Image: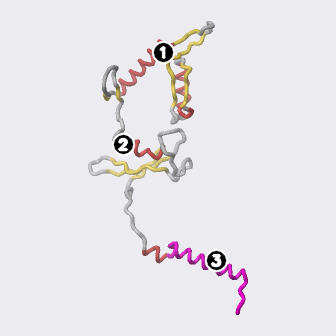
Amino acid sequence: MPTVTRREFLKVGVAGAGAVAATGLGFDIAVAESTRVKQNLRIAGAKELHSICPYCAVGCSLVAYTRQKSNGTTELLQIEGDPDSPVNEGRLCPKGATAMQLAISPRRVESPQYRASGATGWKSVSWDFVLDKIANNVKASRDASFITTDGNGSTVNRCEGIAFAGGAAFSSEEGYFATKLMRGLGLVHLEQQARV
């Protein structure tokens, strides 16, 4: 009876296990070719556009797939993370993963809405109306709550009737500008969304 060394036994065992595993997992080229299934992807032939996620200042890259419809409008088919981005490498957080809903949700409000005092519903208004309304409200609140001196008679020149919360999607420059603007109005209650 021939003797088999432990080393020879391991060599044969490993080689046999590798062959069985490779064949059983579909690495046989002939099997792979015969079982190939063609898929019609929803984004086949779509135009690929690159963008940035709007939710925070991280700057994750997005890839949006669009297709021209027969009536001339553009249809958004899919939004996903950009695998070529060094920032997110194709991954998206839960908020970024909902970018498609932000773009095409039937519940999306597409114009400024205003509900007058005592009214029961909202109405669509122009951006000019909204900006004028905000400016008038800021002016009225600042005039009503501006304090020039504190209890000790020290000059403080501050506005305690308005607070400002910056958005996490602000760039450094936008944050700097917003802070300067609010400090210029005398606001002392400044906060940032990322801390809330």
- CA separation in Å, label 3 and label 1: 80 Å
Q: Is residue 89 above or below residue 8?
A: above
Q: Is residue 126 above or below residue 87?
A: above
The image quadrant where one finds the C terminus is top right
Q: Which residue is mark 2?
A: 105
Whole-percent x, y for residue 41 in the image: 38, 59
* Amino acid type shown at disc 1: Arg
* Amino acid type shown at disc 2: Ser
Q: Which residue is mark 3?
A: 14
- Quadrant for residue 10, please give it: bottom right
- Quadrant for residue 118, please give it: top left
Q: 26 or 134: nearer the eye?
A: 26
- CA separation in Å, label 2 and label 1: 37 Å
Name the residue at 39% across, 52% down. 47
In the drawing, what numbered circle is on residue 142? 1
- The furthest residue to the bottom: 1
Provide the residue span drawn in magenta: 1-28
